[in-house]
Image: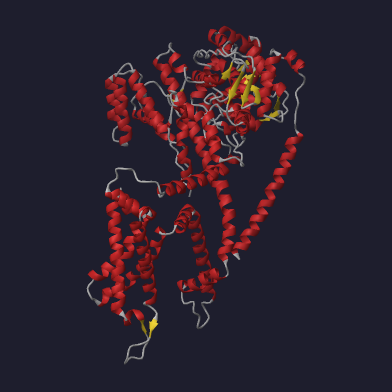
Amino acid sequence: MAAGVATWLPFARAAAVGWLPLAKKTMPKPPVDNTSRSDEILYVNVSGVRFQTWKNTLDRYPDTLLGSSEKEFFYNEDTQEYFFDRDPEMFRHILNFYRTGKLHYPRHECIQAFDEELAFYGIVPEIIGDCCMEEYRDRKKENQERLAEDTEANEASDAPLPPHSTSRERLWRAFENPHTSTMALVFYYVTGFFIAVSVIANVVETVPCRPPKGSVKDLPCGEKYQLAFFCMDTACVLIFTFEYLMRLFAAPSRCKFMRSVMSVIDVVAIMPYYIGLVMPENEDVSGAFVTLRVFRVFRIFKFSRHSQGLRILGYTLKSCASELGFLLFSLTMAIIIFATVMFYAEKGTKGSTFTSIPASFWYTIVTMTTLGLVKLDSVLQKHWSQVYHQNFIRLKVRLARIRMAKKGTTNAFLQYKEDRDRDSDSTALCVKNRSAFEHQHHHLLHCLEKTTNHEFTDEMNYSELCMTESVGFRTSRSTSLSSQQGAQNNSTGCCPRRARRRAAMRLANSTVSVSRGSVQELDTLHIKTTSIPPQTRSSLNAQADDLKLNCGEQDFTAAIISIPTPPANTPDESLPPSPAPIPGILRNTRATAYTHDTVKISSL
Amino acid sequence: MGAVVGTLTMQTKQRRPSRDKADDDLEMTMVCHRPEGLDQLEAQTNFSKRELQVLYRGFKNECPSGIVNEETFKQIYSQFFPHGDASTYAHYLFNAFDAGHTGSIKFEDFVTALSILLRGSVTEKLQWTFNLYDINRDGYINKEEMTDIVRAIYDMMGKYTYPVLKTDAPKQHVDAFFQKMDKNRDGVVTLDEFILSCQEDENIMRSLQLFENVI
């Protein structure tokens, strides 16, 4: 749990004395605390640099390496210290996290090295403080993009083929990496040449040529030497079609190939020709056909197979797509505003060219682009992206974290109550993977329940209860089938999800004792649904792996969610770690309660 | 043109918050409280030196300025009860902790209250609780005060409870409380009535021992 929260828990528990005279029921027994009360100094030797800290400091985060018994594996009896053969510079930051509750990302460090250290010490990167989170995420995104480029370069490397490859695989490899064989190289240059020829032909056929004998008007070359251009076009299209079909044949995954950008460009480049062949010599339709010929210019994009630079440009555009989108949007807004202003300003004047607002669009666009307002926009862009990041993304991340922490610890207490109801004397089972802090906190909440003689529950069960009570049907704790059937009949007709859950509840209650297997199933269910981390941008997707660090713990939710709560130290965040229990009858519904944990954030 | 206006307004906005923040920071650093010596505190409370050290280290870590104001106090307390609204009860708690009514809790106040609650005698604990309930500090708990306290406690439960929280639940609770505590039926509970009634109740006596080993 967060350092702050852990420190104040004794005070909160002491303040519970104020409830005692009001309590309607007897208070539950407090959890047994076996840890020694006295604080001691631990020595941690990291590659020769000695750190000293209080044991309590490390105990604040029991789900990490240093906070759990895992550090005993590194204990050196002879020197009476914990020895870690890791980077002492990085360890400083790790230890500061324990001390202050905030994890900072050092800007001069490599992002991968930092991630590895965090993974070793069992710290989830999500808890990096807001001050460093943006920098961390940006670096991580950069790194991933670079890795993606590297893997692509590796795929296209000159490594020798595996020995038993089919001709199809060889063909595909020849296409992807032309340097492997001379045939591939020849094919590569031939296609390149024909792309160039095709593009030049497109350009030249519109140039006015000298008119043929007997005519005065200048004709474009395309019409004068119509047959020649047609032959050239046919040859190019034949080559391109052949190339496309060969690639399609050789592709390891045809669906994926057909969906790829390059294949779409190929198709778009050759389709106008075929459509032209098929189309009849109709006056009306040929007008549309002429427009279709515009798409022949897409052949120039085929060059991106031949040039890595073009591909990288494509990636760059893709990565800043959202910013570009906003740029276009803001430009459009400005154009509309100024065009409207110009139109109404010139409305009365005779002979004005601004006959309508769209007519003034052209004027506005030309003026804006000529005056280089795009440059000003880039300045705005820089500030905008800063402001955007600060306000929206960070706020969303923070809110998502708070919500997730809330729900997570809700479910922790939920499961605690469930286990408690199940076997009240054998607490060994549930005690195992919960920290002392959690036990004490749960005890505190339990005291509150006893004081008011009401129990905590979650939103879904509450709405059910409201419904059943309004219908006049009382849900009792008994496992009589008739009462459940009654509940089913009375509240059927609501959303099918509820009906399904009620059916599940009936199922659960018909077995008087919940078997170990079913509880495990529920546990895995809730592990599955809670293992989805908060996703802000795609860069965080990769960090899903880090959350699997604490597997093996039954109370998975508490394990992963307890760590993100440290930001509670900042005054504008209140990260309440408290859970909410449910009554014993609604056992199975716990599984679906966990689906609330996935909190998705869209960046725009 | 629009962009120029935009940039102008942006700049003026940037200048203003920094000035306010500077003032706030200055104020914060000026108000820094150091507690009395360790020996004095040990004499005044029932804690040992070691326990006081542990307590102070935690306190100082959270509040480097040495004092807790009401807002921070409410936030801290609310962390433990996310589903409900703990701010009202925290307000009453704050007043109970802030014995000197200075508007902020210092480490001495904090430790004194903890000493009573965790290490004090039964009478002291009950006295502290009476002090908490007696909002206006007039020596009597009347029904309005008790209703406020009970309502604040029920607020901490939040909306989603089982069974569903009825609107008159606090009132019923208060009535039951007065039934038990108000011996002479005069509508108020005095300190003596309170202590006497609590001592008669087995449950309360037993539960008062619950939090002995919190520290």
A340 or B198, which lies in front?
Answer: A340
Q: Position of residue A356 (x, y in %)?
A: 46, 74
Residue farthest bottom in this picture: A214
Q: Which quarter of the image is occupied by the N terminus of chain A?
A: top right
Q: Depth check: A430 or B68 in front?
A: A430
Residue at position x 43%, y 33% from top? A531
Out of B44 and B195, give the one closest to the viewer: B44
Say above or below: A245 vs A593.
below
- What scheme was used to colour the molecule? secondary structure
**Lateral position of residue A378 relative to residue A415, left or right:** right
Q: Does the image show residue A419? A: yes
Can residue B142 be seen by looking at this rendering?
A: no
With A314 as the anchor, is A139 left or right in this view? right
B55 or A510, which is in the foreground? B55
Q: Residue furthest front?
A: A182
Above or below, A303 against A451 in this view is below
Quadrant position of residue A139: top right
Residue A248, picture quadrant:
bottom left
Relative to A552, does residue A536 appear above or below in the rendering? below
- Location of residue A71 in the rendering, given as x and y in whole percent from the top left corner: 55, 21
Residue A229, horizontal then vertical, whole percent: 31, 76
Q: Place residue A492 in its image quadrant.
A: top left
Name the residue located 53 percent from the left edge and 10 percent from the top edge. B203
Query: How many numbered discs, if any?
Result: 0
Query: Residue A479, how many percent across, how many down?
Result: 31, 18
